[in-house]
Amino acid sequence: MNRTFQYVATALLLALTAARGSAQTPTCEEQLQEVVVLGKQKPKTLLRRGTRMPGAIVMLTPDQVGHEVGSALTLRHATELKEMTLDIVSNSVAEATLSIMIYRDSTYTEVLESPLIAHIPQGKKQTITVTPEKPLLLEPGRYIIAVSFADCAKETRAQWTLSGQWTDKQRYGMARQCCMQFPLYSKVGYIRADATDTFEQRNLNIGLKVKGIGD
């Protein structure tokens, strides 16, 4: 009887060992997902606007489509970005669109497959909040989050194609009628004319605010 019990126990042990060996090993991606599950935490501010400069504005006109203004964000831990917010003093550009891109600071490699888009209505004193449609997880590191003047009405862009030939007075008059105005903040920022340029550092910014969980 004792020998029979020993045979059964050995068979069960071998069966359990084989089952464990045949089980699928979690992939690196699955392990990472387990690590970065952030739970139902309350979003907190990861990037602040800076100090508002009273009365000062940044003006973007239709001939500056593609122009980017960025802010640096340093993350110590895996973080889920929840929302990005900025204020607009006024917008008189028809069908104006802003986009937000995220770059790795060291290489300018784009993190997002496609930019986050915000359609800006014409009007004054607007607060624009951009929320990712799906979870946006960033690993630890330093990033540049850049706001870009993405597009506007075709008729408006066509009207501004000859802006390089205007006098300063003509350009100023046109800009007063057709531009986006942002409040100016005293905070380190990064600007470039388009994606082919290198970001240049400035001590001024348009006051992007970023919230997230996990950092």
Image (cartoon, rainbow, N blue to C red):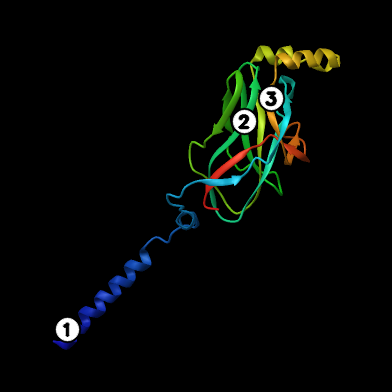
Residue 128 lies, in percent from the top left, at: 57, 30
Q: Is residue 166 visible?
A: no
- Tell me the mark number nearer the camera, choosing from 1 and 3: 3
Label 3 amino acid?
Answer: Gln
First in sequence: mark 2 or mark 1?
Answer: 1
The residue closer to the viewer here, 199 or 72, is 72
Q: Secondary structure at mark 3?
A: strand
Judge from the rendering whether residue 166 lies leftward or rightward of residue 117; answer left or right. Answer: right
Q: Which residue is mark 1?
A: 4
Q: Which residue is mark 3?
A: 181
Q: Which residue is mark 2?
A: 87
Q: Give the answer, above or below, for where 179 lies relative to 133.
A: above
CA gap between label 1 and label 3 equals 87 Å
Judge from the rendering whether residue 58 lies leftward or rightward of residue 135; answer left or right. Answer: right
Q: Cβ–Cβ below 8 Å for labels 2 and 1?
A: no
Label 2 amino acid?
Answer: Asp
Q: Give the answer, above or below, for where 138 lies relative to 155.
A: below
Q: Cβ–Cβ below 8 Å for labels 1 and 3?
A: no
Judge from the rendering whether residue 163 lies leftward or rightward of residue 151; answer left or right. Answer: right
